[in-house]
Image (cartoon, rainbow, N blue to C red):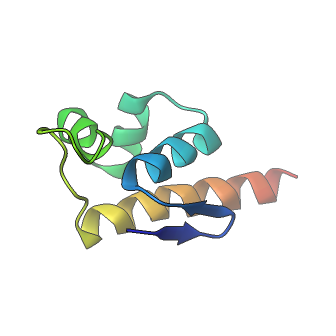
């Protein structure tokens, strides 16, 4: 799966979530809360795809994560 979000061009869901977390500069639990996802469930999304605990994000989860990133970018843009 290749997910692109503006400056993010990543190959895996795990890389996408790591890049988003780094951009937001929050903890994993805070990131999960911002996206409205249970932190335990969110952990399964960021596991390596070969892990038994890995879960693939469905479109609603992906949209929630992308929305959090977009809101962050808008906030940063307005404060600049």
Residue placed furthest toward the right: 80
- Judge whether residue 18 can be spotted in this image: yes
The quarter holding residue 44 reads: top left
45 left or right of 1 in image: left
- At a point 19% along the width and 44% down the height, the residue shown is 54
Residue 31, horizontal then vertical, whole percent: 42, 39
Question: Please, is residue 47 above or below residue 9 in the view?
Answer: above
Please report the residue visible at 79 percent of the width from the left and 59 percent of the height from the top. Answer: 77
Foreground: 78 or 72? 72
Q: Position of residue 48 (x, y in %)?
A: 30, 41
- In the rendered image, the quadrant that contains the N terminus is bottom left
Residue 57, position as x, y percentages in the image? 25, 60
Name the residue: 66% across, 70% down: 6
Tell me if residue 38 can be seen.
no
Q: Is residue 68 left or right of residue 72?
A: left
Residue that extends furthest to the front in the rendered view of this protein: 50
The reply, left or right, for residue 31 in relation to residue 4 is left
x 41%, y 45%: residue: 34
User: How many numbered markers are drawn?
Assistant: 0
For residue 10, what is the image quadrant?
bottom right
| 76, above or below 53, in the image | below
Residue 49, how many percent across, how many down? 26, 48
Q: Is residue 16 left or right of residue 24?
A: left
């Amino acid at each position: 799966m290749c997910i692109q979000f503006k400056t993010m061009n990543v190959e895996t869901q795990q890389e996408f979530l790591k890049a988003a977390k780094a951009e937001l500069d929050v903890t994993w639990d805070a990131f999960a809360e911002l996206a409205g996802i249970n932190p335990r469930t969110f952990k399964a999304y960021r596991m390596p795809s070969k892990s038994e605990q890995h879960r693939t994000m469905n479109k609603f989860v992906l949209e929630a994560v992308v929305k959090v990133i977009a809101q962050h970018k808008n906030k940063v843009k307005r404060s600049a």
